[in-house]
Image: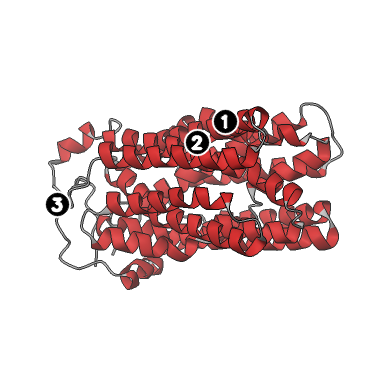
């Protein structure tokens, strides 16, 4: 049995209970990791912003082919998230270095996009990039969770996600400016993206604390079986199941942007700016919704975010084609992420003991990532066979069903002790 001690710091030292009140202030680890994520997201979102147009418009991939690649890009990390979380927990304080290996691997993939131009090698590069993301995500979120007081985790994750999204806001803008200023626009985007990604790795190595590996090892060595065994606990199981069900109805961002382009006839040269709307709303709302989740319940805010996503889907399906449509849809899309991304990790942290924090969060993330991978494949196939409207109508139905189950299964905001 693992018992989580909310008084333990990231490096494993047990402090008096009064220290927990001091730790309610935002931890330096959160700000340092937020800076790393900001820089890294500038790099990754530069590529993400142009990738749909590059693959569909430039290389002529069908929606089904793009759905396959997009599923790989967003879902392949699920294969290695458990491994990344397990390595971080087993290392007794190696969260920073496992995360650093993931950031480094993703950085190395950027220049490879300069030399591959067909479906199979591009898929392999994207799979390798997502392997890096899978390695880093759970250890990074574990560091945020372990360095924050339980009652302030929603705010901590909100601040981190806001900084992360500031990078997501700058990345598409940088890609847009590069495409307008250069002849070989895509190659220039991939090259600059690589340079920025390297800078993010350097910031992690130099400024993120917790890299000495001096954390005390738990009496019971963490195992993957123990992490999966957390699903036997009612609250963790409910969080994981609800995240999986709702993930099955979460259409990829790239498909949302492609749908907007088709509805409104957005010129190709402006396509890279569409993610800015989502990122701006995410940035503005992440901290506020994180703090709201700490006050009114994380699961209430999480489900509210999916209500915003449902509204965005319905607007894309409806007859309205006004000039305000893209702004409203992208604002709702950003609200969805602000209310769900960090909030889910804050909610899951309450039921996962410190000795298994990284791998336990990875279990929840893996289920959600696999569900979104399946959604990308199914949505791309439905678009190819029946058209985009029928595919989106199916996503609306799936989201309504998933939300209904999530309302029934909704967990309580758990405590810090797990048996």
Q: Give SS at disc 1.
A: helix
Where does residue 34 sit, x and y in percent of width and height? Answer: 38, 36
Q: Identify the residue position indicated by label 3 in the image.
A: 214
Disc 1 vs disc 2: Cβ atoms closer than 8 Å?
yes
Whole-Å distance between the Cαs marked 1 and 2?
8 Å
For image coordinates 42% across by 39% down, the residue present is 37
Q: Identify the residue position indicated by label 1 in the image.
A: 174
Whole-Å distance between the Cαs marked 2 and 3?
32 Å
Mark before the other along the chain sequence, 1 or 3: 1
In this rendered view, identify the residue nearer to me: 140 or 349: 140
For image coordinates 60% across by 56% down, the residue present is 116
Mark before the other along the chain sequence, 1 or 2: 2
Q: Is residue 204 left or right of residue 217?
A: right
Q: Identify the residue position indicated by label 2 in the image.
A: 42
Disc 2 vs disc 3: Cβ atoms closer than 8 Å?
no
Where does residue 206 sit, x and y in percent of width and height? Answer: 26, 38
Hey, which quadrant is residue 86 in on the image? bottom left
Where does residue 373 sit, x and y in percent of width and height? Answer: 60, 60
For this orientation, the residue located farthest to the bottom is 225
Hey, which quadrant is residue 269 in on the image? top right
Q: Nearer the viewer, mark 2 or mark 3?
A: 2
């Amino acid at each position: 049995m693992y018992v989580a001690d909310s008084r333990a710091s990231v490096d494993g030292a047990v402090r008096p209970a009064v220290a927990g009140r001091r730790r309610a202030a935002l931890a330096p680890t959160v700000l340092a990791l937020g800076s790393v994520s900001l820089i890294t997201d500038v790099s990754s979102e530069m590529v993400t912003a142009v990738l749909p147009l590059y693959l569909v418009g430039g290389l002529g991939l069908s929606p089904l082919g793009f759905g396959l690649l997009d599923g790989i890009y967003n879902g392949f990390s699920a294969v290695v998230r458990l491994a990344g979380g397990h390595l971080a927990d087993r290392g007794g304080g190696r969260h920073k270095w496992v995360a650093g290996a993931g950031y480094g691997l993703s950085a190395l993939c950027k220049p490879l996009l300069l030399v591959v131009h067909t479906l199979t090698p591009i898929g392999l590069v994207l799979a390798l990039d997502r392997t890096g993301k899978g390695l880093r995500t759970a250890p990074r979120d574990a560091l945020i969770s372990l360095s924050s007081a339980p009652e302030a985790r929603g705010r901590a994750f909100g601040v981190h996600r806001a900084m992360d999204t500031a990078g997501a806001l700058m990345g598409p803008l940088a890609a847009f400016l590069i495409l307008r200023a250069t002849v070989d626009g895509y190659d220039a985007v991939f090259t600059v993206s690589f340079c920025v990604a390297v800078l993010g790795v350097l910031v992690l190595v130099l400024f993120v604390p917790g890299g000495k590996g001096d954390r005390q090892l738990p009496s019971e060595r963490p195992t993957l079986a123990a992490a999966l065994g957390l699903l036997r606990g009612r609250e963790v199981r409910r969080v994981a199941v609800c995240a999986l069900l709702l993930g099955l109805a979460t259409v990829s961002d790239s498909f949302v942007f492609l749908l907007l382009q088709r509805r409104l006839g957005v010129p190709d040269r402006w396509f890279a700016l569409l993610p800015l709307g989502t990122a701006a709303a995410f940035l503005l709302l992440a901290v506020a919704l994180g703090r709201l989740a700490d006050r009114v319940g994380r699961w209430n805010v999480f489900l509210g975010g999916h209500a915003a996503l449902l509204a965005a889907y319905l607007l894309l399906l409806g007859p309205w084609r006004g000039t305000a449509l893209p702004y409203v849809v992208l604002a709702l899309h950003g609200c969805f992420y602000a209310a769900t991304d960090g909030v889910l990790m804050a909610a899951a942290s309450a039921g996962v003991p410190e000795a298994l924090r990284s791998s336990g969060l990875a279990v929840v993330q893996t289920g959600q990532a696999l569900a979104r991978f399946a959604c990308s494949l199914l949505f791309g196939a439905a678009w190819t066979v029946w058209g985009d409207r029928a595919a989106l109508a199916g996503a609306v139905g799936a989201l309504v069903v998933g939300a209904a189950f999530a309302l029934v299964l909704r967990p309580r905001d758990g405590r810090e002790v797990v048996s």
